[in-house]
Amino acid sequence: TVENWPRPTTARAGDRCFMHVRWAMRTGVVAHPQWYPDLTVDSSFEDFQAYLHNGAHHGCSRPCSALPRTVCHTAVPGEVCHRHVRWAMDVGIRSLPAWYPTLATDSSFEAFQAWLHH
């Protein structure tokens, strides 16, 4: 049918829409919640992309359906995720605090990991 064309596509790193969705998720919804009615920092990537698509913003296509949430674990030393979380906690939050608007220097490892995963 016509409404299924073009085919839904969730933005990926390098796509025109991707950086706009990430900015909206991490910064926009915190700094300007009125711009994103019905969305929160807990909304999915696909929810934000759908909102941008419906408003014809930034060339975002209709996203695929969101994948079900998976069970996560706290990253451990030796995992790539652990290295990224440690950097965010030790360097990122101090040098680029705007990247972490809902976190503080004393936020837990798990809070940083959840923010980076989202």
Image: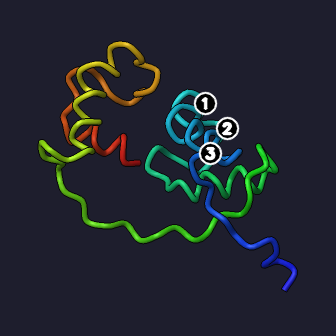
Residue at the extreme top of the image, as rendered: 95
Instruction: State left or right for residue 29 relative to residue 5.
Output: left
Report which residue position mark 1 lands on.
32
Answer yes or no: do the residues labelled 2 and 1 have beta carbons within 8 Å?
Answer: yes
Element carrying mark 1? loop
The residue identified by callout 2 is 35
Query: Residue most toward the left?
Result: 77
For the residue labelled by badge 2, is the local secondary structure a helix, a strand or a loop?
Answer: helix
Number of other residues with Cα within 10 Å of mark 3, as a class: few under 14, some 14 to 19, many 20 or more? few
Q: Residue furthest bottom?
A: 1
The answer to whether marks 2 and 3 mark residues whose Cβ atoms lie closer than 8 Å is: no
The quarter of the picture where the N terminus appears is bottom right
Q: Nearer the viewer, mark 2 or mark 3?
A: 3
- Percent of width and height locating residue 68: 41, 71
Nearest to viewer (mark 1 / mark 3): 3
Q: Residue at x 42, y 17 (%)?
A: 96
Give the residue drawn at x 62%, y 55%.
Answer: 11
Q: Residue at x 18, y 48 (%)?
A: 75
Amino acid, disc 3: Gly
Q: Return the x and y of residue 112 as percentages of the image width and height.
A: 28, 36
Instruction: Point out which mark residue 116 bears.
Output: none
Vertical order, 110 against 62 (above or below): above
Is 44 situated above or below 87? Answer: below
Marks 2/3: CA distance?
A: 24 Å
Whichever of callouts 2 and 3 sits on the residue coming sooner in the sequence is 3
| Left or right position of 29 against 2 | left
Structural crowding at the residue carrying mark 2, measured as other residues with C-alpha within 10 Å and reported as few (<14), some (14–19) or many (≥20): few
Disc 1 marks which amino acid?
A: His
Q: CA distance from mark 1 to mark 3?
A: 25 Å
Give the residue pinned by disc 3. 14
114 or 92, nearer to the observer: 92
In the image, residue 107 lies at what x, y percent?
A: 22, 29
